[in-house]
Amino acid sequence: MKQRVFANVVMAFMLTASTFTYAGSILNRDLTFIKTANTPNGHVEIHTASATSNYQTRTLELWTTFTNETDGTWQILSNNDLAFIKTANTAHGYVEVHIASAASNYQTRILDVETTFTNETGGTWQILDNNDLAFIKTANTPNGHIEVHIASATSNYQTRKLDVATTFTNETDGTWRILNNYDLAFIKTANTTNGHVEVHIASASSNYQTRTLAVATPFTNETDGIWQILGNNDLAFIKTANTPNHHIEVHIVSAASKYKTHILDTATTFTNETDGTWMINEKMGAWQPSEQNGLPWWQFSDSNLTTFFIDIIPFFVGLF
């Protein structure tokens, strides 16, 4: 059932520690595990623990339409749909994109398509917020530099909209990611100068030629987990092995502190597991004009089917 929450506009900023504002939307940082092997019925499963419970409460556990498969990249999209980018053993030698809808509880496929890309595993595949398909090529490039290749969702992944070499030389001892603003980030997790994880960013506006950030973080080099830069550029580490109590841990340092301050260090409900994909799943929503009882409000709906109605009248009265 859809929840409905009513509040004065000032309450829009009184959010829980696990909920953040970003570009006019709300992000809820739930932890999701896409289990892609060793499942009871041979189907990929999705398990989610809520950020609001400090990752102690499971909010979703179900199997999907997909059979277990590991020859590609699994990803929960910004609208909560489940995507599989198949990068090997495809029918015609081309990378494929397969998507199952969250609305159907991941039982219905809404996309099964070949793309312009030939099968390739020497890099990172990612579906962006606008559903474009990106490939960050990190090895065997002609000039020894990382390349970014993007095919548009609007062309059903048949048309390339970007093919460019970047400022970064080829490197595989870390995690590559295209951020929400399309900047390119490299989280270097091994062989760093002072033994600490580093964050390096090149701007999309410079066609990935200009570095805008190169900084060491409080994290010591570690590879037994998943590194992720979140929607507001905070850095998250999901530790999936060698934890003290054998439970998955979530650690986050803030971008606002230039990656110096930890804002979360917690064990979760999940026991350590590596036969799948872990990610912080940031659920987004949008504010829209609405009306309740004849009065103007702003309505926010997120992918958890929670609707906030914010009363704007007292706010505007206070301005005069």
Image (cartoon, grey):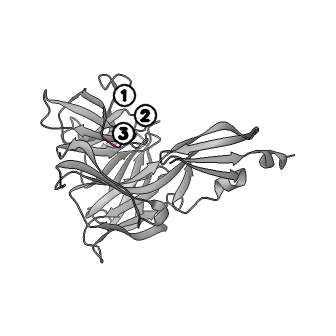
Q: Position of residue 131 (x, y in %)?
A: 38, 34
Comes first in the chain, label 3 or label 1 = 3
For residue 130, the mark is 2
Disc 2 is placed on an element classified as: loop
For disc 1, the marked residue is: 153
Residue 26 forms part of the magenta stretch: no
Q: CB of mark 3 within 8 Å of CB of mark 1?
A: no
Dot 3: element: loop
First-in-chain label (3 vs 2): 3
Q: Mark 3 packing: few (<14 Cα in 10 Å), some, or many (20+)?
A: few
- Residue 104 magenta: yes
Q: Position of residue 255 (x, y in %)?
A: 49, 57
Task: Give the crowd class for mark 2: few <14, some 14-19, many >=20 residues within 10 Å.
Answer: few
Cα separation, mark 3 vs mark 1, equals 21 Å
Q: Position of residue 139 (x, y in %)?
A: 20, 43
Q: Is residue 112 above or below residue 75?
A: above
